[in-house]
Amino acid sequence: MADATTTVIGPGTRVKGEISFDGPAKILGEIEGRITAPGELNIGETAICRAAVEGAVVQIDGVVEGNITAHQSLLLSPSARVSGDIVAASLTVAPGASWNGHCRIGGDPAAAGAAPAASAAASRLADVPIKPRVTISGKVVSTGTPAAAPSTPPAAPVAVGADLESSLAGLESKIAGLGRKTAE
């Protein structure tokens, strides 16, 4: 994403307050406060943002502790660690990403009247028709702490198939048998 016109906040840089960009931006340092960009915004792998984040196309590779509003799309990469609510037109979550919060997906968050990255953004969108465009390309691991990687690998997916069907059939017959015994 970085090119000659992209603003880069380098590693080791600390900003406290509100920061807004006119064009594409990549953050590799630490930001505390609020971040807005009308276009592409990348929170790099070395970034730690304790901030409300708003942009058209947002990619998270680092740590974000705060609410995120993405007017077009939001990508949580495998190294993303997010703690906060998400309001986005579309969401892609890569395997290994960690996210703890609520989300509202579909439509344009700005058109729905949502304040950028406000804590009540999801509740204000309650009456907006949702056209889900969520892509989950693997397991999402939610840890209690956004900066920490999971200490144990996620459990294997549960197979839903013949075993489940036979277990349900067995339970149904047992329940039916209980009904007969109480009726006698």
Image (spheres, rainbow, N blue to C red):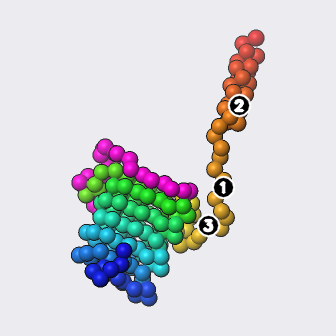
The residue indicated by pointer 2 is 166
Q: Disc 2 on helix, strand or loop?
A: helix
Earlier in the chain: of badge 1 and badge 3, it is 3
Please give the residue where the numbered disc 3 appears in the rendered image: 150
Q: Position of residue 145 (x, y in %)?
A: 55, 68
- As shown in the figure, which amino acid type bears the numbered disc 1? Ala
Q: Position of residue 90 (x, y in %)?
A: 37, 55
Q: Residues within 10 Å of mark 2 (few under 14, many from 20)?
A: few
| Residue at 38% across, 62% down | 74
Q: Tell which circle, 2 or 1, labels the residue nearer the N-terminal end.
A: 1
Residue 155 image offset from top left, x and y in percent: 66, 55
The residue tagged 1 is: 155
The span from disc 2 to disc 3 (Cα, nearest Å) is 34 Å
Image quadrant of residue 176?
A: top right
- In three-dimensional space, the C-alpha distance between marks 2 and 1, rounded to whole angstroms, equals 23 Å
Q: Residue at x 48, y 66 (%)?
A: 77
Q: Is residue 123 magenta?
A: yes
Query: Local crowd at mark 3 within 10 Å, few (<14), some, or many (≥20)?
Result: some
What is the x, y in percent for residue 112? 26, 52
Q: Tell me the amino acid under the disc marked 3.
A: Pro
User: Given this view, does label 2 or label 3 mark the residue nearer the observer?
Assistant: 2
The reply to whether the magenta stretch includes residue 72 is no
Looking at the image, which residue sits at the far front?
Answer: 3
Which of 138/167 is in front? Answer: 138
Local secondary structure at mark 1: loop
Magenta stretch, residue numbers: 111-139
Disc 1 and disc 3: Cα gap in Å? 12 Å
Q: Residue at x 70, y 36 (%)?
A: 163
Q: Nearer the viewer, residue 161 or 51?
A: 161
Q: Looking at the picture, which amino acid does disc 2 mark?
A: Ser
